[in-house]
Amino acid sequence: MSVFSGIPSNHFILVVCILCLGVLCGGQTEFGTAQMEKAEQAALYSAIQGFVGNWWNGSDLYPDPCGWTPIQGVSCDIFDGLWYVTDLSIGLVHDNSLECAPEVEFRPQLFELKHLKSLTFFNCFTSPRRHPVSFPSDNWEKLSGNLESLEFRSNPGLVGQVPTSFAFLTKLQSLVLLQNGLKGEIPENIGKLSNLRRLVLAGNWFTGKAPGSFGSLTELLILDLSRNSLSGPLPLAFGGLTSLLKLDLSYNQLQGKLPGEIGNLKNLTLLDLRSNRFCDGLSQSLQEMHSLEELVLSNNQFGGNLLSLDWRRLPNLVILDLSNVGLSGEIPESIVGLTKLRFLGLSNNNLTGNLSPKLASLPSVSTLYLNGNNLTGELKFPGDFYGKMGRRFGAWNNPNLCYPVSLMTTSHVPYGVNPCQEDITLADPNSMTKLGDPGNMNQNFHFVISLGFSSYDLDGLLWVFLVNTLVMVQLSNFPL
Ligand SMILES: *[C@@H]1O[C@H](CO)[C@@H](O)[C@H](O)[C@H]1NC(C)=O
Ligand SMILES: *[C@@H]1O[C@H](CO)[C@@H](O)[C@H](O)[C@H]1NC(C)=O
Ligand SMILES: *[C@@H]1O[C@H](CO)[C@@H](O)[C@H](O)[C@H]1NC(C)=O
Ligand SMILES: *[C@@H]1O[C@H](CO)[C@@H](O)[C@H](O)[C@H]1NC(C)=O
């Protein structure tokens, strides 16, 4: 029984039970009899030892890694009557995962595991200064027969460039290089991995252009290149990504006009281009993407106006964020046709004109930011709208916008908006003393905000509470 010497006794009992079960069930199954190929076993031990450190003696700790002594993060399957490793997951995923050593290294034996379908590293390469590690530049072709998923997540110590030899991994369906320390240009030949369904290269230091070659990835469902330093225009070829569901290019330095070709992405549900340098107006092709649910274009230099699009052609929109993109002109009533809209962000533009009271009738809207524009006239939303929305209705910093003074007797007024002056002077002269100086009241609102509640994230309910309290304090200061 020496083979079991490394196993705690309760595990031993379990093993015996499984053995018994195997016998009871006939004991003829492949599972009961298969061996692990010796070379495969040695390669597995050595590859893991390279990641977790020399203290780890696999043959001692896990004499039968595909059988009685499974290793957390290792899965196996049988080919021609022998066990081979199919999944290898390294790094702190669970409490008992294989944790990487400070001197982590890729050993060549990793590439002997020819049946690997999935290879994942999480939080494994963690020291970009003390111990930076680069990808091995070759050998990847040895895994080309089976590897479908290659993922490196949260490895700041994984530095250098993406090897062009990744292009040999033609079976890959998922390539995720998320939040590592990678830099340089993204290899064009990644675009040859025609089976890719998910390509995530977000949160690295990649520079240069977004590769036009990606346009030939016609099976791709998710493309995320966000949070890098990519520059240049959005390639026209991206119009070829006709299966795409999610395209996230946010937080780069991409620039220029949006190509009309993106209108071909008929299945796209998420388009996030926030915080880039796109310009030249909102492309008409945006309204061809009929499936869009989330359109986030904030913090760009688009310019132009909202009238250039027929918003009713995007009936599935739930999130529309066009904050700080240099829009001018009026807010068209066609926006009211977006019946699923929950978030509408139009803040910090140069929008003008009166607000249609119909905006309040957007049936699903829970957040509406119009602050930081040049909207004018009287806000004609029903009073309970402000109550319902709280601070998730933003209309402050529109110096020529006001709300009807009649609202001041209710507990809900839009934050940071002045009451209409004309109303006050036209009303009963006593009303001034009755309600206090409205300008003063607004300053008090600013005072509350400056106490540190100025973030957009302030909980709406808390805000409503603060505003209500303030209004009540204000009112109670004056004899009614
Ligand atoms: C693991 O331990 C065995 C004996 O317990 C020893 O023969 C073998 O060399 C060790 N392997 C490594 C890689 O340290
Ligand atoms: C778009 O989605 C529909 C419905 O899910 C699907 O039938 C169609 O094949 C998709 N189009 C492409 C180009 O993948
Ligand atoms: C808004 O428009 C006015 C008038 O066209 C212009 O002077 C001003 O610079 C614009 N402001 C912004 C922030 O674009
Ligand atoms: C806001 O609009 C008014 C006219 O409605 C105009 O006189 C004023 O210059 C505009 N302010 C800005 C900052 O664009």
Image (spheres, helix red, strand yellow):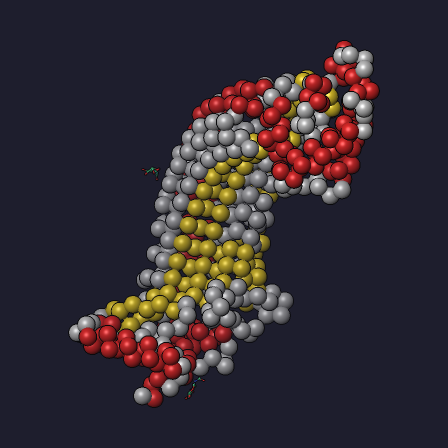
Residue 258 horizontal side relative to residue 192, left or right: right
**From this viewpoint, is residue 59 visible?**
no
Residue at x 44% of width, y 28% of height: 315
> Which image quadrant for residue 28?
bottom left
* Coordinates of residue 351 in the picture (x, y in percent): 64, 24
The residue drawn where x is 37% and y is 65% is 87
Quadrant assignment, res 242: top left
Residue most toward the bottom? 2
Q: Nearer the viewer, residue 188 or 393?
A: 393
Q: Nearer the viewer, residue 28 or 268?
A: 28
Whether residue 183 is situated above or below residue 70 in the rendered picture: above
**Can residue 458 be seen in the rendering of this structure?**
yes
Residue at 53% over, 23% down? 361
x and y, in percent, of residue 377 in the image: 68, 17
Q: Is residue 29 left or right of residue 12?
A: left
At horizontal 50% and vertical 59% (from top left) the residue drawn is: 153
Please tell me in which quadrant of the rendered image residue 466 appears: top right
Q: Quadrant of the N terminus?
A: bottom left
Q: Quadrant of ligand 1?
A: bottom left
